[in-house]
Amino acid sequence: MKAYVSVFKLRMANGMQYRIAALAGVATQLFFGLIFIMILVAFYRHGGAEMPITLPQLAAYIWLQQACLSLIMLWFRDNELFQLITTGNIAYELCRPTNTYGFWFAKLLAMRLSSAIMRCIPVLFIAFLLPEPYRMSLPPSPVHLILFVVALILGLIILVAISMLIYISTFITMSPTGSLLVFALSGEFLAGLTVPIPLFPGWLQNIIYALPFHWTADFPFRVYSGHISAHDAWLSFPQQLAWIVILVGLGMIAMRAALKRVVVQGG
Amino acid sequence: MITVNGINKSFKVAKRTAGVGSAFKALFRREYTDVAALSDISFSIGQGEIVGYIGPNGAGKSTTIKVMSGILVPDSGTCSIMGYTPWQDRVKYVKHIGVVFGQRSQLWWDVPVIDSFELLRDIYDVPESEYRGNLTLLTETLDLSGILHTPVRQLSLGQRMRCELAASLLHSPSILFLDEPTIGLDAVSKLAVRDFIKVMNKEKGVTVILTTHDMNDIEALAQRILLIGKGRLLYDGGVEDLRGRYAADNASIEDVIVQMYKEYQIT
């Protein structure tokens, strides 16, 4: 266990070194947050019909997306891990007395968290100061805030478990581009990062709820704004946990199979 | 201590002739040839030996090291090292070995060397007192005191290689596999590395298996050499015997090896 905690800490420390990257990230996220909300405001003004989610709830949804970007985006990746696989540096990883799946999992968690810590606070701080309708709102009660944090953490574990499948697929394809593109694009769409999921037609929503992606972003953000009630949030946690068990189990099996037939070339 | 018996390993290599025509054909039918990287390799090595493992490029040296360190699974054959089968009991086994791949790095690129060392301490779960002792000894013999707090990316190749060697010995392994540890090093660093290997072998009784293309490494270190060519083990014996067999007394070790490669037709 100590090994996993230690690599987590070192990866955190490593990630927090990149200050300028974080600053650039904050600027980008503010820009995109504003643009997305502008589009939605225009859409709401001329939409007319009864909307399935209120505009302030939607603003919170978008700002949380931007602030937590590195916790919810599948394209946010550790290129070092891809290089490890394609260049054969994985040789070193394999002569350590650790479970490679767990080791990488800890590394990826730390990478996402270190990046999120540096970006989310400035983005949220500015979002709270903006004028209506762009302003970020507080959750309806402290209970919602706690439930949101729990949902986000469970969602993060689901997301890293999904991203592990991308890394493992590189053992077979030897190039991360294909699986990254497929996973990132479809995953983003199905997690409500392109269009918020409450605005989707009903039949599509039903498909999305049967898949794991919306648990990583859409679900925690709607818990925050109160669009999903505290009661329903409680009832949903077992489903998040079930997805964690399924995805981690799948990843571990796939990893074991991949390592058995690994070929370390050159050198 | 180490018994290798009848190891075979072959790789699949995709083959086609040059040109667009054959590239097009390969879209539909791809031809593979099996390349035997290792065929029927057997040897045994006793505790405290330093064994030089030599052969031309592509002979199978690194493949053997990778099989013995549990990274590659051979097609057939058995291997017992300290009672373990490397690729089956990988996690338990690798605690007892240290590995250095001269052409790869196990240190974290963006953080000071000491951070990587402390991570390794936790990965191998080395008790604090043992870690302190090893670190002091390694810092002295490899002259690391000035560079422990420097980020790895700012080290020269020679400095980095000294750190790589130290990194692979922090957990007091009983066997050390060195795959081209002197590649690309200047004369001073080479001598430092050689002296260090000797000291570790004498003082801590570490068994060393090293591959190299620098015959001076072999002459300075190894009492025994294994020669491999085209995947077959061709010679197993003392360095001095070789000299008697192939050349006059004043011939350099380089000449002896060239003679030998010629005789076995493996160049």
Image (cartoon, coloured by chain):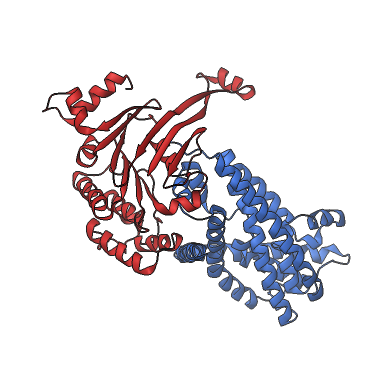
Q: Is residue A161 visible?
A: yes
- Quick one: which chain is blue? A
As displayed, is residue A151 above or below residue B196?
Answer: below
- The structure residue drawn at horizontal position 45% and vertical position 39%, both measured from the top left corner, is B79
As displayed, is residue A171 above or below residue B42?
Answer: below
Q: Is residue B183 visible?
A: no
Q: Quadrant of residue A32?
A: bottom right
Q: From the viewer's perspective, tell me whether residue B39 is left or right of residue A233.
A: left
Q: Quadrant of residue A77?
A: bottom right
Furthest-left residue in this view: B250
Pinpoint residue B201: horizontal percent, then vertical percent.
26, 50
- The structure residue drawn at horizontal position 70% and vertical position 72%, both measured from the top left corner, is A148
Q: Nearer the viewer, residue A239 or B233?
A: B233
Q: Quadrant of residue B58?
A: top left
Pinpoint residue A267: horizontal percent, then vertical percent.
39, 38
- Quick one: which chain is red? B
